[in-house]
Amino acid sequence: MAIIQFPKDMQWGTATASYQIEGAADKGGRGVSIWDTFSKTPGNVVNGDNGDVACDSYHRYEEDVELMKDLGIDVYRFSVAWPRIFPNGTGEVNQEGLDYYHRLVDKLLENGIEPMCTLYHWDLPQALQDKGGWGNRETIDAFVGYAELMFQEFSGKIKKWLTLNEPWCISFLSNFIGVHAPGNQDLQLATQISHHLLVAHGKTVQKFRELGNDGEIGFAPNTTWLEPYSNRQEDIDACNREIGWYIEWFMDPVFKGTYPDFMVDWFKKKGVELDIEDGDMETINQPVDFLGINYYTGHIARYKENEGLLDWEMVEMNYDRTDIGWPIFPEGFYNVLMRIKNSYGDIPIYITENGSCYNDEPENGSVKDSGRINYLQQHLTALSRAIASGVNVKGYITWSLMDNFEWAEGYTMRFGIVHVNYRTLERTKKDSFYWYKQTIANNWFEN
Ligand code: GCO
């Protein structure tokens, strides 16, 4: 038993994303996104599920804010569906979409909850995908135009902004591995997209500064940790490549203005040629106010020649796994945060996502998700170690407020601290909700 205590000004929150919770896909003037198209193409999503209804938060946002108020959070991280604002990506603005986010943000502010807004959590307008999506540099300008409108519209109301959620997923998972929308399998394209995303991020930060709005801006890369199976150099290098693909590939350009050589060389070996225009690296290398970090899992791995893109294989060490099959690896969370501190210094960090999949169902009105409580305890303990080691952590935002559309897994995988019955849309607080509420109220817990 130990008391794990957090700094006095620690901010606590929960996160969601538009396509995963809003539903109302054809309501309020919303345009079509790549996730509508992708999920309705047979074979892409388990059970053929899609986000047409999801948690219906578009209509039930007041009830959802009530849940947050009861929980006692300081900050709610949500994302805006770009096609609700610009149904065609550019051009005509849909006032009904803006009105919805005003209602949501007003309700949050009335209840003393600070909004943290993610501008892009994957629902690209299909109209832009039809012209090449993130592979086309015109999408960069379209994004900056959308961001500019949002900055102006919500000036004084939203003071924490994130440009992109998980650029690794937007580029490589969606365009090389191909399991997320738009589902391409092309390493050259995916790598070029990762560059366009970073340019879009940099230009958006520039626009934000130019407007002079009160507030802070950052981005939220996803991270993972691979611990080398042995101290053989080839095992260490293999693990470094995988970690570097998530961390240095996306953070070095932002913080240092360069891509990491070890990854550039590796991609070159795989035949990838990055097209970087004059001024791109300076554009990307804009100071950000904070960094969002998403972390879920890690494991043990070693070098294996010609295995996958980066020549490594996982070694089964029988770590416990969550219901989605991801090993529980809290030491990776600590190591990721220390690696970031060592490379990029004391940039303020919000943990913008961390959470677990457990598919417990309600019984007599309660959901006994002890697995999730255990996961939270272990990861918050790792976080507290990182804070003690000098990582500049400002807040912790758990994924997720409620069960929702888990992308290619559809509705089969539940990450919420609130259960959602997808037939009746009824919300039920899980045991982890009550545990998190107590932790927030105390600012400590006993593990
Ligand atoms: C993410 C995803 C979330 C997922 C969560 C669990 O940002 O990783 O955006 O939307 O639901 O990560 O897989």
Image: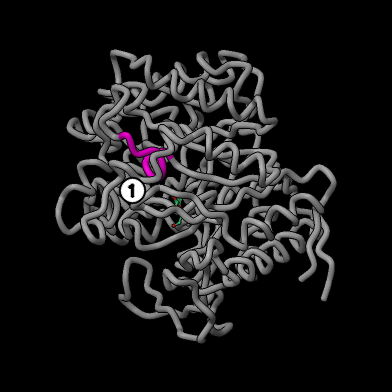
Residue 360, above or below 402: below
Residue depicted at x 56% and y 63%:
366
Q: Which residue is mark 1?
A: 191
Q: Quadrant of residue 91?
A: top left
Type of amino acid at the residue the image marks with label 1 = Thr
> Residue 329, position in %: x, y?
58, 72
Q: Nearer the viewer, residue 224 or 366?
A: 366
Residue depicted at x 16% and y 50%:
41
| Residue lying furthest left | 42
> Residue 233, position in %: x, y?
53, 78
Asked whether 401 falls inside the magenta stretch, the response is: no
Residue depicted at x 24% and y 46%:
182
| Residue lying furthest front | 364
Q: Quadrant of the C terminus?
A: bottom right
User: Residues in magenta?
Assistant: 18-24
Q: Nearer the viewer, residue 418 or 80?
A: 418
> Residue 337, position in %: x, y?
66, 57
Is residue 13 found left or right of 243 in the rendered image?
right
Q: Quadrant of residue 438?
A: bottom right
Residue 395, above or below 141: below
Can residue 287 be seen here? The reply is no
Residue depicted at x 54% and y 78%:
228
Can residue 246 be seen here? The reply is yes
Query: Which class describes the residues within 10 Å of circle 1: few (<14), some (14-19), or many (20+)?
Result: many
